[in-house]
């Protein structure tokens, strides 16, 4: 009996010692994924028609969030770049995005937090095809939004930020200004445009079913200084259908409405099976 008691006491002591030597829990939550999608269509003497083409898309989606006491700081980095090679045409972009969104909040009551946010977005390159050179390039245009507001955050997977006094700065290379019209709202010959308005950002991610996740990112903006009824919209849907640890089927759909760039809906859709690395 004494041996049993000594053994129990010894195990308890070891357990207590191990608990006391554990590293303190980190206040950071970090999670992300790197994905490479490859698509190909080949035709040879195909009477029904078709053009041989190949496309590839590389993307990074990374979240790094901080939580301690009454403070929260959420960051999301999205980067993707894709190219398409069509047999009878040159190399063209199929996807191009670089965006960082950051929101810091201090708990107010319940799920509500006093907040301040910063959003930056641009693209990596121009149109790539020398015959159809587009007006965009790295940091032209670049959109910067920031301002105070209120954050409703139930979890890292469900949150809404409302900022009624948001400053918005649009930066462009004035040498690329399109003739006879404004360039993303920037007057010809100038390199920037300032706006102030209301911004709403929403994020919701959930599992549609086992191994299928849906990520929804919505951003709305209304400029108080000009046509406030024309609300800018930027919505992205990312669906990941996991096959195994490395292979997945991915669908990315994005729609934008910005009447300073184009008076109508812009849409982009990328679907493919590829290598998916989660870290």
Image: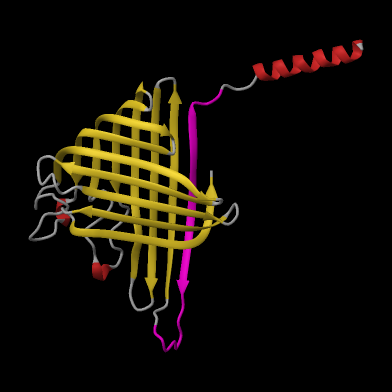
Q: Look at 19% across and 47% down and name the residue there.
A: 231
Q: Residue furthest left?
A: 180
Side of 265 relative to 69 (left or right): left
Side of 100 relative to 171 (left or right): right
Choose between 8 and 25: the one closer to the eye. Answer: 8
Side of 234 relative to 70 (left or right): left
Q: Does residue 45 lie above or below 108 as drawn?
A: below
Q: Is residue 41 magenta?
A: yes
Q: Does residue 54 lie above or below 248 as drawn?
A: below
Q: Quadrant of the N terminus?
A: top right
Choose between 135 and 116: the one closer to the eye. Answer: 116
Q: Quadrant of residue 2?
A: top right
Q: Which residues are magenta?
A: 25-49
Callout count: 0
Q: Look at 47% across and 57% down and name the residue there.
A: 250
Side of 209 relative to 152 (left or right): right
Q: Does residue 164 lie above or below 10 as drawn?
A: below
* Residue 229 percent across, percent down from the top left: 14, 46
Q: Look at 34% across and 27% down and name the residue there.
A: 112
Q: Is residue 243 magenta?
A: no
Q: Does residue 49 lie above or below 156 as drawn?
A: below
Q: Quadrant of residue 71?
A: top left
* Residue 48 percent across, percent down from the top left: 41, 86
Q: Look at 48% across and 43% down and name the residue there.
A: 32
* Residue 253 percent across, percent down from the top left: 37, 57
* Residue 171 percent across, percent down from the top left: 19, 45
Choose between 118 and 2: the one closer to the eye. Answer: 2
Choose between 60 and 223: the one closer to the eye. Answer: 223
């Amino acid at each position: 009996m004494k041996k049993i008691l000594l053994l129990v006491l010894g195990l308890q002591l070891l357990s207590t010692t191990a608990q006391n030597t554990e590293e303190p829990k980190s206040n950071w939550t970090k999670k992300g994924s790197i994905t490479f999608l490859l698509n190909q269509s080949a035709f040879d003497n195909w009477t029904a028609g078709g053009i041989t083409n190949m496309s590839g898309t590389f993307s990074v989606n990374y979240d790094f969030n901080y939580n301690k006491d009454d403070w929260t700081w959420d960051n999301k980095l999205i980067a993707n770049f894709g190219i398409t090679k069509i047999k009878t045409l040159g190399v063209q972009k199929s996807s191009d995005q670089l965006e960082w969104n950051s929101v810091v909040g201090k708990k107010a009551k319940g799920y509500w937090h006093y907040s301040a946010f910063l959003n930056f977005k641009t693209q990596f390159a121009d149109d790539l095809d020398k015959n159809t050179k587009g007006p965009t390039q790295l940091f032209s245009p670049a959109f910067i939004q920031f301002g105070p507001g209120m954050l409703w955050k139930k979890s890292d997977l469900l949150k809404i930020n409302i900022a009624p006094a948001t400053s918005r700065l649009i930066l462009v290379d004035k040498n690329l200004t399109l003739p006879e019209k404004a360039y993303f709202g920037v007057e010809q010959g100038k390199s920037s445009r300032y706006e102030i308005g209301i911004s709403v950002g929403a994020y919701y991610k959930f599992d549609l079913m086992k191994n299928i996740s849906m990520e929804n990112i919505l951003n709305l903006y209304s400029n108080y200084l000009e046509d406030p009824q024309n609300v800018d919209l930027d919505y992205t849907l990312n669906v990941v259908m996991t096959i195994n640890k490395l292979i997945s089927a991915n669908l990315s759909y994005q729609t934008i409405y910005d009447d300073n760039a184009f008076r109508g809906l812009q849409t982009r859709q990328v679907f493919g099976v590829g290598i998916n690395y989660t870290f």
